[in-house]
Image (tube, rainbow, N blue to C red):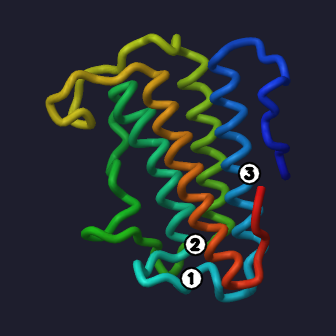
Amino acid sequence: MTIPFPSPTEPTASEAEVFTRYLDFFRSTLIRKLESLPSGALRSSSLPSGWTPIELLRHLTYVERRWLEWGFEGLDVGDPWGDRRGDRWYVGPGETFAELADAAREQAARSAAVIARHDLAEVGRPGERWAGRPPATLERVLFHLLQEYARHVGHLDIVCELADGDVGE
């Protein structure tokens, strides 16, 4: 499902809804772009850094988990760095795009629930995520997530252009 770009002039019920709409837009754009790639392009890299489009999907799913559940709410999420092997993003050979897309959608639902449970000015729980620094507010975490998605979806545009997939918003 494609979600249209959130118009700055479209009314919202709250500031939290603005964040939620933009996150929904970037998630749907990410999955649409990945679905547009030719066969084989999900697991191959066309960039010197070596990351693959399917690794990007898993990475962004874990980014949300790390920042909202593990970081902000202080929950035990198992392995918060499960998208990595060493210093690289990683997807196992048996993991499918469909499974990872479903996991991303499930994470999106959990993230929306976190956002709904808290005020934007609320400060996160102290914990390992903050590496000894004071925890951030939910608003700051959401700004960070939007930046992460926008940057990576832009990176994916380059990959899609090189592979004849969908580009642009």
Please tell me whether residue 129 is drawn above or below residue 35 in the rendered image: above
Q: Which quarter of the image is occupied by the C terminus?
A: bottom right
Q: Regarding mark 1 in the picture, which secondary structure is present there?
A: helix
Q: Which residue is mark 1?
A: 43
The three-letter amino acid code for the residue at tag 2 is Pro
Q: Are there few (<14), some (14-19), or many (20+) residues within 10 Å of tag 2?
A: many
Q: Regarding mark 2 in the picture, which secondary structure is present there?
A: helix
- Name which of mark 2 and mark 1 comes first in the sequence: 1
Q: Are there few (<14), some (14-19), or many (20+) residues within 10 Å of tag 3?
A: some
Q: Residue at x 35, y 33 (%)?
A: 71
Q: Calculate the distance from the C-alpha at mark 2 to the C-alpha at mark 1.
A: 7 Å
**Which residue is more in the foreground, 13 or 114?**
13
Q: Which residue is mark 2?
A: 53
Q: Which residue is mark 3?
A: 28
- Mark 3–mark 1 CB contact (< 8 Å): no
- Mark 2–mark 1 CB contact (< 8 Å): yes
Q: Quadrant of residue 49?
A: bottom left
Question: Residue 5: image x %, image y %?
Answer: 80, 42
